[in-house]
Each structure stands twice: as structure tokens, then as C-alpha cells.
Amino acid sequence: MTASVTDCVDVDFQRDAELSVDDFTDLLRRSGLDARRPVDDPDTVAAMVGHANLTITAWRDGTLVGVARSLTDFRYCCYLADLAVDRDCQRSGVGRGLVDATRDALGPRCMLLLLSAPAAVDYYPHIGFEHHPQAWVLRNAGFDGGAP
């Protein structure tokens, strides 16, 4: 599918296209999410890319300008782990296009969940998300030797 947006024209959205660790890391840096993601740990980034089971990418002239990386069962819930858009394409519809393409891949009653970066808190209500105050986070949850 292709979308034309205000500042980032001719963006091509693709489902489960090949995504390299280098391209993903570069986009995280260009989006500003590098401050909240382990971009200096290529093994972890490789696991992030490799274990996502729904990835929507946005490309402009062969350059990755957006990613929606999710983990889902496609029927009940989908955790949108990363929504990254190149700063040059933010506020142009690319993020909404990535979310819409993610939603298109899900069943009709599937719930889409995410944790917002502090700078994006005001964005999500604008595209239909509701704030959920009963969320919990357990950081460093893996036991020593227990992670794959």
C-alpha cells in the first residue's frame, strides 16, 4: 500500500518486509527513540527485530522512514513495542499510516496496546488511543540464565 502525506510524499508501507538491524538502529536514532532503546547493543536489537511477529515498515525512495514493530496473537491483543518515525517525517501521517496498517493486520476485536515515550504522550489520543492507568512494568524481568 502507498500513502501520500504532507511532508513525506510517496511513502510505501510494507508488512513484514526484510528489516536489517542496521536500518532499524539507524531509524531509532533518526526518530529520537534511541534514548529509550538499546541501540548500542546489536544482539538485543537483533532479537527485537527477529522476534517481532508483525512489522510494518514505511519507505521513501528506498530509505526506511518508519517502523511499527509488534508482538501479537492477532485475535486478542497486540503489543506495539516500537512506533518509530524519522524526525523529518513526523507530523506528516507516517505514524498514523503505520498504526492503520498494523490495525489492518489484526482481527476485528484485537486490542492494540503500547507504552508511550514521554514526548509522545499527547500524540496517541489524537489517533484514537485511550489512556489506561492500570498498566504495570517489571524491568529486568529475566532471571539469570533463563532468557533464550
Image (spheres, grey):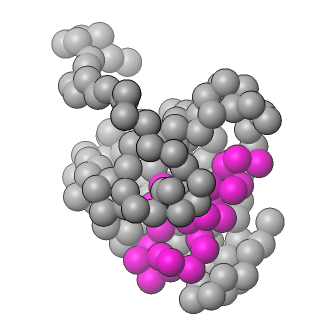
Query: How many numbered marks does the figure carry?
Result: 0
> Does residue 21 appear anywhere in the picture?
yes
For the point 50% across and 56% down, the residue is 125
Assess whether residue 2 is covered by the magenta stretch.
Answer: no
Indicate the quadrant containing the N terminus: top left, top right, bottom left or bottom right.
bottom right
**Which is more toward the observer, 134 or 28?**
134
Q: Position of residue 24 (x, y in %)?
A: 44, 58
Image quadrant where residue 75 sits: top right
Residue 140 lies, with reference to residue 20, above or below; the image says above
User: For the magenta stretch, what is the residue range?
Assistant: 83-104
Apparent side of residue 25 relative to residue 74 in the rendered image (left or right)? left
Image quadrant where residue 48 sits: top left
**Which is more toward the observer, 64 or 106?**
106
Image quadrant where residue 9 sits: bottom right
Q: Position of residue 59 (x, y in %)?
A: 62, 71
**Which is more toward the observer, 61 or 4?**
4
Residue 12 lies, with reference to residue 100, above or below; the image says below
